[in-house]
Image (cartoon, grey):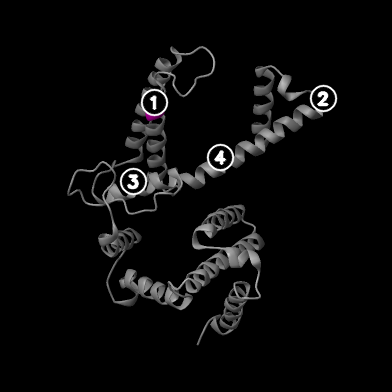
């Protein structure tokens, strides 16, 4: 046996025993009460915390969050075993089979010369595996093939990118990023038109019943979808890109408010021109 397995296996066995004890008769009341459904929110939370740690580049945080995520996997498997569904051994066995099946270029001698070929073959194998479990999209015509096999509770930008990759496999896609940018600009113009129409129906703040709201929502949705496809075409993850933009805005805004405080200015009371000047100063200092 080579690699880290001799070191890892005893530690992994200990972890499995710890989780089993937490769920045992003398275990933790909280862990004993959990179900697959109740734990779902924690799995999602840990996945987001892991992504944040990876993006931060702080490896100690990545190490810790990987452990927290692994705990969720083991705990879910233990709950399933306690409820008579399956156990951790079955999870690992099925995963082993799946990884070997989906990597024929590694385990079966298939010749796939590029990452793109590997990706397309992976999608083909995956679609075949899930074919019997898929359902057509809501509103599809009878007999429509089920194409979009992804979790419907994915973050919307991530789902949009997956939709784009699926339609790319069906040869329904733009040829270049510039063509996608033209689509983004088209959607932006349509959004501007919908906004102008919408603004004619209210003077201050709109309410859910404001006429034109549904049209504007439709156009903004199309704009966001097109923007996510532009990110996909240049090899960017739109979800991660937006997270980075969110953090950049937060950092800049905090610095803007702090800078106003240094000069004894109450930020909220400042005129917009002064706020913009502070914002531009902070941006300039970052370069």
Tell me which numbered mark, 3 or 1, is placed earlier along the sequence.
3
Q: Would you call the spot at circle 2 few (<14 residues within 10 Å), some (14-19), or many (20 or more)?
A: few
Tell me which numbered mark, 2 or 4, is placed earlier along the sequence.
4
- Residue 164 bears which disc, if any? 3
- 41 lies above or below 191: below
Secondary structure type for disc 1: helix
Mark 3–mark 4 CB contact (< 8 Å): no
Residue 166 as seen in the image, left or right of residue 271? left
x%, y% of residue 166?
30, 50
Tell me which numbered mark, 1 or 2, is placed earlier along the sequence.
1
The boundaries of the magenta stretch are 215-219
Residue 79 as seen in the image, left or right of residue 221? right
x%, y% of residue 32?
60, 68
- 263 lies above or below 67: above
Label 3 to label 2: alpha-carbon separation: 50 Å
The quarter of the picture where residue 228 lies is top left
The residue carrying mark 1 is 214
Q: Would you call the spot at circle 4 few (<14 residues within 10 Å), some (14-19), or many (20 or more)?
A: few
Secondary structure type for disc 2: loop
Query: Is 174 in the magenta?
Result: no
The residue carrying mark 2 is 264
Between 59 and 286, the residue placed more toward the observer is 59
Residue 107 as seen in the image, left or right of residue 19? left
Between 1 and 158, the residue placed more toward the observer is 158
Between 219 and 118, the residue placed more toward the observer is 219
Secondary structure type for disc 3: helix
Residue ID at (56%, 40%): 245
Tell me which numbered mark, 1 or 4, is placed earlier along the sequence.
1
Secondary structure type for disc 4: helix
Residue ID at (43%, 20%): 195
x%, y% of residue 114?
33, 62
């Amino acid at each position: 046996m080579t690699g880290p397995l001799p070191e890892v296996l005893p530690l992994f066995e200990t972890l499995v025993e710890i989780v089993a004890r937490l769920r045992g008769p003398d275990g933790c009341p909280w862990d004993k009460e959990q179900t697959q459904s109740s734990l779902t929110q924690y799995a999602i939370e840990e996945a987001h915390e892991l992504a944040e740690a990876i993006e931060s580049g702080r490896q100690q945080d990545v190490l810790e969050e990987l452990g927290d995520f692994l705990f969720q996997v083991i705990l879910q498997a233990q709950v399933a075993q306690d409820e008579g569904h399956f156990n951790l051994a079955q999870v690992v066995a099925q995963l082993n089979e799946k990884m070997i099946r989906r990597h024929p270029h590694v385990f079966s001698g298939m010749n796939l010369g590029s990452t793109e070929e590997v990706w397309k073959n992976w999608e083909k194998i995956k679609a075949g595996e899930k074919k019997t479990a898929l359902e057509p999209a809501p509103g599809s015509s009878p007999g429509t093939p089920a194409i979009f096999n992804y979790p419907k509770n994915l973050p919307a930008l991530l789902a949009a990118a997956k939709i784009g990759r699926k339609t790319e496999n069906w040869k329904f896609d733009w040829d270049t990023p510039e063509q996608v940018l033209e689509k983004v600009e088209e959607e932006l113009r349509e959004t501007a038109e919908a906004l102008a129409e919408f603004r004619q129906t209210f003077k201050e703040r709109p309410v859910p019943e404001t006429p034109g709201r549904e049209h504007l929502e439709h156009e903004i949705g199309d704009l966001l979808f097109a923007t996510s496809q532009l990110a996909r075409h240049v090899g960017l993850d739109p979800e991660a890109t937006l997270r980075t933009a969110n953090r950049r805005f937060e950092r800049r805004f905090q610095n803007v408010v702090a800078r106003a405080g240094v000069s004894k200015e109450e930020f909220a009371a400042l005129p917009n021109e002064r706020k913009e000047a502070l914002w531009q100063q902070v941006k300039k200092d970052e370069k």
